[in-house]
Amino acid sequence: MRLTILFIFLPTLLFSQEVDSTKVYRSLEQALKNPQEVFHLDLKGQRLESIPAEVFQFSELKSLVLKRNRIEEIPGEIEKLQELEVLNLSGNRIAELPLALFGLKDLKELRLGKNDLLVIPSGVNQLQKLEIFDVWSNRLNILPPEFADLKKLTFIDLRINPINEEDQNYIRDLVPYVKVNMSLSCNCY
């Protein structure tokens, strides 16, 4: 009598640990325990004065929330986060954007509201997947012409920026396919 052995292949989930790509880490210490499994990091309101260098270890990071801190600059290492789709640095003290920021090719949402930005540098058109650009309550008075190249852009928030009426019209003409929120023209600063 011949014995036939059947092998049943169980899903690999039984043999390897499944990674929860929806988990939001709210502690840098916890996130550092499994850096390859960190997809969402929320360090809002922790009184950070800079972006912790450890953040740049999270090569799989999809969203990074650092709003309501005391961050004054975005280091060039930000470009290491090539999987990043959402970056929220609202409510900080950022006055300049590094060109390295524009190397984040998968970035879809950039929130920089309530900072001290005076200008958006040329190069923003490298963010070809950008859909949302939120810079409310800064010191901006114009956007660079490169914004016309951002074909996936759907929303810009420019409220509470000192943009005169002529420049508001220029911006609307620059991106006619985009919903743009702006405050009434004022001498805000």
Image: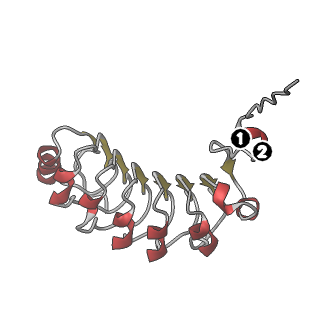
In the foreground, 6 or 43: 6
Residue 142 percent coordinates (x, y): 21, 59
**Can you name the residue that lies furthest to the front here?**
1
Q: Are marks 2 and 1 in contact (CB under 8 Å)?
A: yes
Examine the rendered structure and indicate whether residue 99 appears above or below residue 89. below
Q: Which residue is mark 2?
A: 15
| Amino acid type assigned to the residue bearing label 2 in the image | Phe
In the foreground, 45 or 82: 82
Q: Quadrant of the C terminus?
A: bottom left
Residue at 78% in and 29% down: 6
In the foreground, 6 or 159: 6
Examine the rendered structure and indicate whether residue 44 appears above or below residue 97. above
Q: Quadrant of the N terminus?
A: top right
Asked whether residue 98 is in view, the answer is no
Within 10 Å of disc 1 (Cα), the crowding (few <14, some 14-19, many 20+) is few
Residue 138 percent coordinates (x, y): 36, 60
